[in-house]
Amino acid sequence: MVVSCATPGCTNNRTKTPNLSFHRLPPNTKETQLLRKKWLHNIKRTSPLPKDIYFFVCSAHFDDSSFERDFERLN
């Protein structure tokens, strides 16, 4: 399975751009529905996504401040 970015117009995928990280959209569940809507709004995704498929956003669409570094977990 090729992991591709769900951002409209973005053609990044893990094979073509291995230097980027890919972050799964929150699942479409009752508990995470609001967070998922925020993600979709921020990437300007207007077309609906199927419920049963995982979608990703590549790190090209995040600022460095969006990431929390936890180097302690690397040990």
Image (tube, rainbow, N blue to C red):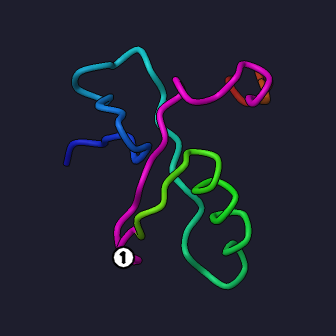
Side of 31 relative to 15 (left or right) = right
Q: Is residue 12 above or below residue 9?
A: above
Residue 44 versus residue 18 in the image, above or below: below
How crowded pointer 1 is (Cα within 10 Å; few <14, some 14-19, many 20+) is rated as few
Q: Percent from the top left, x then y, of residue 59?
A: 54, 27
Whether the magenta-drawn stretch holds residue 52 is answered as yes
Choose top left, top right, bottom left or bottom right for residue 5: top left
The residue sitting at 49% across, 54% down in the picture is 45
Q: Is residue 60 left or right of residue 14?
A: right
Q: Residue 26 placed where, x, y %? A: 60, 61
Q: Is residue 40 above or below residue 68?
A: below
| The residue stretch that appears in magenta | 49-67
Of the 4 image quadrants, the one containing the C terminus is top right
**Who's the residue at 60% across and 80% down the image?**
29
Q: Nearer the viewer, residue 57 or 38?
A: 38
Q: Which residue is the site of mark 1? A: 52
**Amino acid type assigned to the residue bearing label 1 in the image:** Asp
What x and y, as percent, mark residue 58?
47, 33
User: Could you say which quadrant of the image residue 66 lies in?
Assistant: top right
Q: Would residue 37 be found to the left or right of residue 19 on screen?
A: right
Work out whether residue 38 or residue 54 is closer to the camera in this orientation and state it. 38
Q: Which residue ends up furthest to the bottom in the rendered image?
A: 30
Q: How many marks?
A: 1
Asked which quadrant contains residue 17, the reply is top left
At x 31%, y 41%, the residue is 4
Q: Secondary structure at mark 1?
A: loop
Is residue 64 within the magenta segment?
A: yes
Residue 69, how many percent across, how many down? 77, 24
Q: Nearer the viewer, residue 22 or 74?
A: 22
Q: Residue at x 55, y 75 (%)?
A: 28
